[in-house]
Amino acid sequence: MANPYIRIARLKDANSFMEYTQSLDIDLPMDEKLQVGSQSPLAQSYSLKSGRQIGNRFCILPMEGWDGTDDGSPTDNTKRRWLNFGRSGAKLIWGGEAVAVRHDGRANPNQLMIQENTLKGLEDLRTALVGVHREQFGSTDDLVVGLQLTHSGRFARPNIKTKLEPKILYHHPLLDDLFGVDPDQPVLIDAEIEALVADFVVAAKRAYQVGFDFVDIKHCHGYLGHEFLSSYSRPGKYGGSFENRTRFLREIVAGIRSIVPGLEIGVRVSAFDFLPFRSGPDGVGQPLEYRDEQGKYPYAFGIDPNNPLEIKLDEVFTFMQLLKSLDIELVNLSCGSPYYNPHTMRPAYFPPSDGYQPPEDPLVGVARQINTVAEIKAQFPDMAIVGTGYSYLQEWLPNVGQYVVANQMVDFVGLGRMVLSYPEMPADVLAGKPLDRKKICRTFSDCTTAPRKGLISGCYPLDEHYKDLPEAEQLKAIKAKL
Ligand SMILES: Cc1cc2nc3c(=O)[nH]c(=O)nc-3n(C[C@H](O)[C@H](O)[C@H](O)COP(=O)(O)O)c2cc1C
Ligand code: SF4
């Protein structure tokens, strides 16, 4: 079925954009005019409680490229992406990309790993990013660079690109079925989780040694950290109660504080999740059905189990309170998972190969993320909060970004896909330059389709570097057969 929604590029001015969002009946506020220079809300620095300054309100979200070596070291493609992050002008770099704390936690055989033998490569990535930022923007005193630490859990593919080797915390009636988890597969036992906690702590120490300002203990997108938060049905000390479901995080934080007290800690969390979606008969995404004997869907964090397409933030607020009590100030709010409900987290006009036609105008998904983040920010005004999902706004990203920052709906505008196609967008906006429309991400999703088909990720349609690689031809051939 053809996508019925209006493309953003066809909305020629701010009025048309605003009229269109009104017609969708969504609340997506924006400033019609962008402020430039030191007066711009996006140019304001942010002071962390430690005294560290973050020089502006753009944050580069973590994005991996499926382009590391077999042993988990960066390649030239990885370095190029990190250089682009440095050239962007954003002053908060959230982790660069997901880096596995050990081999069985890799999301693909080319994911970076943090081990003794890969440390020099990771150090070089950070140094290169900081170096290019210094060359272009002068100061790096107000540049904060973190590293995202992960175990991919249910979505681990450490050895073969096409073969899931899941590590699960509990059996999930829908995800087990969708992703072929054997009903007899054992769940991780508590002792294995304790060993994994130790791996995260060692990884954090290594990140500190090579100069990262913070580590993110990843809790989003269906990976292991996120799965803990929905482990309602798991017995024992890591499941059931809120206290048990957050024990993994608390133990990692305690471990890091005891051996690297100087290292800042951040958390990227999926603030809500929905039922898994799959393509319906017309190709449009639809939620799967599930109810337990009580009529509930007790397998997702941040939603109402009685109505699993309805956000419910009670536990999210408790989680934020926990972060606060752990002295964690940096929080990056995302949602859902790219594997089972991608339209929620990466609103796109064109779905990736394993996706479905959008079940809603992608702007509805953008507004959902922005307004949920604003609701959380209102309750936690003194936490440094990064929002996600802005790329679909395309030419209106700076206008919406300026409004939400100026109105304390969020502290940092996170950029994901946009920075793959148009790395200099933050610098252009801050300098008051007109946007380069040829570089604006149009959410073609090739950066997701390519890795789903075993190729390196990148912006094939708009970035000359990827256009010229042999992989571009392979991707074209694969897409022609879809
Ligand atoms: C190619 C690609 C790789 C990604 N890798 C990561 C990752 O390593 N860690 C993570 O937390 N999110 C990852 N994401 C999600 C992004 O950080 C971001 O949440 C998402 O793209 C939505 O933001 P956007 O609308 O600005 O693209 C990735 C997204 C893409 C497109
Ligand atoms: S491939 Fe390029 S244009 Fe398409 S979604 Fe990714 S970054 Fe955007």
Image (spheres, rainbow, N blue to C red):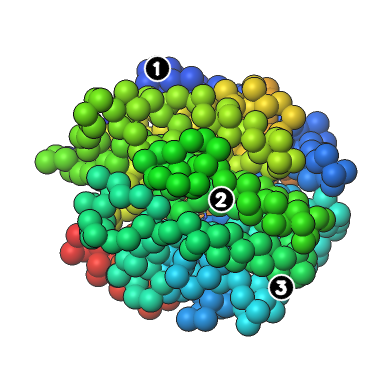
Residue at 38% x, 68% y is: 157
- From this view, report whether residue 217 is shown above or below residue 374: below
Q: Name the residue under label 3.
A: 123
- Above/below status of 102 relative to 48: below
Mark number, residue 334: none
Image quadrant holding the N terminus, namely: top left
Left or right: 124 as drawn, with respect to 367: right
Residue denoted by label 1: 25
Residue 209 spot, x, y in % from top left = 77, 69
Q: Which residue is drawn at 54% across and 31% down?
A: 316
Gap in Å between the C-alphas at discs 2 and 1?
40 Å
Residue 170 percent location from the top left of the image:
35, 50
* Secondary structure category for the residue under label 1: loop
The yes-or-no answer for disc 2 within 8 Å of ligand 1 is no
In which quarter of the view is residue 332 placed?
Answer: top right
10 Å crowding of disc 1: few (<14), some (14-19), many (20+): few
Q: Where is residue 358 in the image (x, y as percent from the top left)?
A: 29, 38
| Amino acid bearing label 2 | Phe
Residue at image position (38%, 76%) is 159
| Element carrying mark 3 | helix
Q: In which quarter of the image is residue 78?
A: bottom right
User: Residue farthest to the front?
Assistant: 236
Q: Name the N-terminal-most of marks 1 and 3.
A: 1
**114 or 1: nearer the viewer:** 114
Identify the residue at horizontal 19%, vertical 60% (top origin): 482
Q: Which residue carries the number 2 mark?
A: 248
